[in-house]
Amino acid sequence: MEHLKIRGGARGLQGKITVPGDKSISHRAIILGALADGVTEISGYLRSEDCQRTLEAVRALGIDVEGGDPLRIHGKGLHGLREAGDILDCGNSGTTIRLLAGVLAGQPFLSILTGDASLRRRPMDRVVIPLKQMGAEMWGRAWDTLPPLVVRGGRLRGLRYHSPVASAQVKSAILLAGLFAEGRTTVIEPARSRDHTERLLKACGQVLETDGREVTLVPAGALRTNRISVSGDFSSAAFFLVAGLILPDSDLTIEGVGVNPTRTGLLDVLQAMGGVVEVQQEEESGGEPRARLRVRTSCLKGVSIGGDLIPRLIDEIPALAVAAACAEGKTIIQDAAELRVKESDRIRAIATALNQMGVRTEELEDGLIIHGCGSLRGASYESRGDHRMAMAFTVAGLRADNETTVLDTACIQTSFPGFVQTLQDLFPGSVEQKV
Ligand code: S3P
């Protein structure tokens, strides 16, 4: 099993780095490129296993894609997809399966979507229910709640849907289906989730009306794209932000990071904890803001978080937990029950990993309490295939006072190929990769 051996006691995280392209935007760019008329060039897109699944799926649906950077997608228009000859394997990627379910709900043919063992445990009723209400026929395992999913698309009608969860994947599936529906499609969320789909749809000439937690797509015919430039993934930068804060003598700059406010809740929290993180040189590219982030070693204090903030940092909670463990006082995370249905049950996983490193935690139904203690004990930790857990606890290992082993690290490829290399460049000799 691939694993990392991390020497503890690292210090002096210095210099300038970049992180790979944003995963959420890369998936969406590929999908919208496939549905657009003509060629879409996507530069800076994330070459990771998750995005490769989306790319292979659109290929299987009859779209030509030329690899390289920029990636060139030969879109065939809204009605140009054709039935795939086989099951579409979405691997570990929730974004692939849920967003494609939305697109396929609008296609007059049969599709079957599945994924790896982790994905086949993740809830799909959250997309099956609204897409059926729009007129698609759908089935799944366990009474239509789990993959594999079978979709027989068809004529759809617009929907006004109150989503029970704040989920960009659910919202996006419904809006993408809305492209094929008659009339307007509205999604109302309990809290606002990331809005990359809305921004990209707008850039493609669609009409989106946003009012607080409510967003409406008014279909406007063909999608027009030509170039999409993808910023660095804030969720990948998060591991280095936390490393910069908790490792002594650090001063690190991360260039070209996407700072869409629906994604940057971690910045607000780290700053509230006393972290010195500066957002510099903000600019806009393709409807998405990007910036340079500078982080320096800081004394952190525990905080309490919950409510509408949670969807803005949901993927960053493993990294935040590591910062909280190194902070003074306790950190309380609530309203985050969604963590239980991510690539792993991240509430349980964080509590287990921190306990192994000598940090006291209390698991809540919808979050956890972390009793920051400032010091971490080296441990052996198994990611169980969850990429963000593997990366967060690699960072924790750097701060620990002796060696840490993180087992099952091949999963890091799903979102951040180059993570280990970046660390090795910053800390020669500190991280050893073993197969
Ligand atoms: C994503 C949305 C979030 C996030 C996931 C990527 C997306 O999931 O956790 O990593 O690209 O839309 P939910 O929509 O399930 O909250």
Image: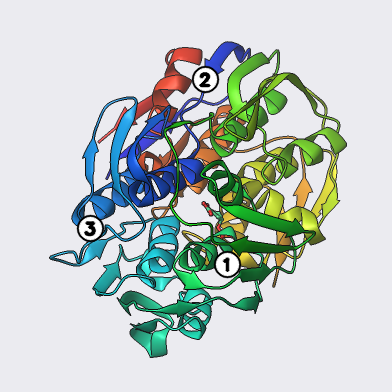
Q: Nearer the viewer, residue 81 or 301?
A: 81
> Which residue is the site of mark 3?
61
Q: Nearer the viewer, residue 225 or 62?
A: 225
Element on which disc 2 rests = strand
Which callout, 1 or 2, points at the residue further toward the start of the chain? Answer: 2
Q: CA distance from mark 1 to mark 3?
A: 32 Å
Of marks 1 and 2, the one in the foreground? 2
Which label belongs to residue 18?
2
Asked if labels 3 and 1 touch by Cβ distance under 8 angstroms, the answer is no
- Establish if 130 lies above or below 10: below
Q: Is residue 139 left or right of residue 355?
A: left
Q: Nearer the viewer, residue 36 or 313?
A: 36
Amino acid type assigned to the residue bearing label 2 in the image: Thr
Of marks 1 and 3, the one in the foreground? 3
Element on which disc 3 rests = loop
Element on which disc 1 rests = helix
> Which residue is the site of mark 1?
340
Q: Is residue 397 left or right of residue 418?
A: right
Instruction: Please tell me how crowded label 2 is: few (under 14), some (14-19), or many (20+) other residues with Cα within 10 Å.
Output: some
Say which residue appears at 35% left-offset and 68% top-offset.
Answer: 104
* Ligand 1 position by quadrant: bottom right
Amino acid type assigned to the residue bearing label 1 in the image: Arg
Instruction: Please tell me how crowded label 1 is: few (under 14), some (14-19), or many (20+) other residues with Cα within 10 Å.
Output: some
Q: Is mark 2 within 8 Å of ligand 1?
A: no
Which callout, 1 or 3, points at the residue further toward the start of the chain? Answer: 3
Residue 402 percent location from the top left of the image = 54, 30
Residue farthest to the bottom? 143
